[in-house]
Amino acid sequence: MSLSYLPLFLKGEVVKGFGRGSKELGCPTANYSREVAQSLPQDIKPGVYYGWAQVNSHPVYKMVANIGWCPFYQNKELSVETHVMHDFEKDFYGSNLKICIIGYLRPEMNFSSVDSLIQTIKKDIQNADELLEVAEAIKLKTHDFFTDQ
Ligand SMILES: Cc1cc2nc3c(=O)[nH]c(=O)nc-3n(C[C@H](O)[C@H](O)[C@H](O)COP(=O)(O)O)c2cc1C
């Protein structure tokens, strides 16, 4: 699906979310502050996206990001949560996170169990992994956005 506001570049500090990401879902997510969420294009389509992510001056890794209200948890505000597809040794609260959102995977959904949410996120990660091997996507990995510190 082609959305006019993509690729979308976002940067900001990682703040504490509700902490469910790693504990309940086995999938750590980095949350942006409300200011970053409020700076999104007005017509942003809530859902799951894929692209590239960089924490401080670490290498650029693949990522999946959920932009929305998390119907499963009934959040009150729009949030941007990024799962960086790399095993980090520590949490990176307070770090600078840059993301380049390239494409849309699916709408946000509600689930009848945590387990089906987990299975769907696993599939999202697999899909992102493949879609980011395409030349057009790889080009954005070395974009100035990531090299300009
Ligand atoms: C790739 C990905 C897909 C997600 N898809 C959904 C979804 O379809 N529906 C939903 O309610 N939440 C979805 N979530 C959000 C999780 O519910 C959320 O990451 C979890 O609540 C952890 O939030 P916390 O770190 O603020 O505690 C998704 C998260 C990720 C990383």
Image (tube, rainbow, N blue to C red):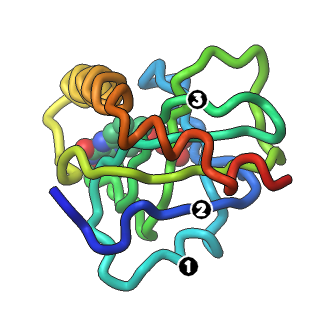
Residue 144 at what x, y percent from top left? 69, 54
- Is the residue 62 above or below the residue 35 in the image? above
Residue 128 at what x, y percent from top left? 33, 31
Outermost residue on the bottom side: it is 42
The quarter of the picture where the N terminus appears is bottom left
- Is the residue 142 above or below the residue 107 in the image? above
Q: Is label 3 in contact with label 2 (beta carbons under 8 Å)?
A: no
Distance between the alpha carbons at the discs numbered 1 and 3? 23 Å
Which residue is the site of mark 2? Answer: 10
Q: Is label 2 in contact with label 1 (beta carbons under 8 Å)?
A: yes
Image quarter for residue 114?
top left
Q: Amino acid at mark 3?
A: Tyr
Mark 1 or 3, closer to the camera: 3
Mark 2 or 1, closer to the camera: 2
Neighbor class of circle 3 (other Cα within 10 Å; few <14, some 14-19, many 20+) is some
Q: Nearer the viewer, residue 91 or 104?
A: 104
SS for callout 1:
loop
* Label located before the other in sequence (1 or 3): 1
Which residue is the site of mark 1? Answer: 39
Which residue is the site of mark 3? Answer: 61
Residue 140 visible from this viewpoint: yes
SS for callout 3:
strand
Q: Amino acid at mark 1?
A: Ser
Q: Amino acid at mark 2?
A: Leu
* Label located before the other in sequence (2 or 1): 2
- Which image quarter has ligand 1? top left
| Residue at (62% x, 41% y) in the render | 142
Neighbor class of circle 1 (other Cα within 10 Å; few <14, some 14-19, many 20+) is few
* Label located before the other in sequence (3 or 2): 2
Neighbor class of circle 2 (other Cα within 10 Å; few <14, some 14-19, many 20+) is some
**With 46 as the anchor, is 139 left or right in this view?**
right
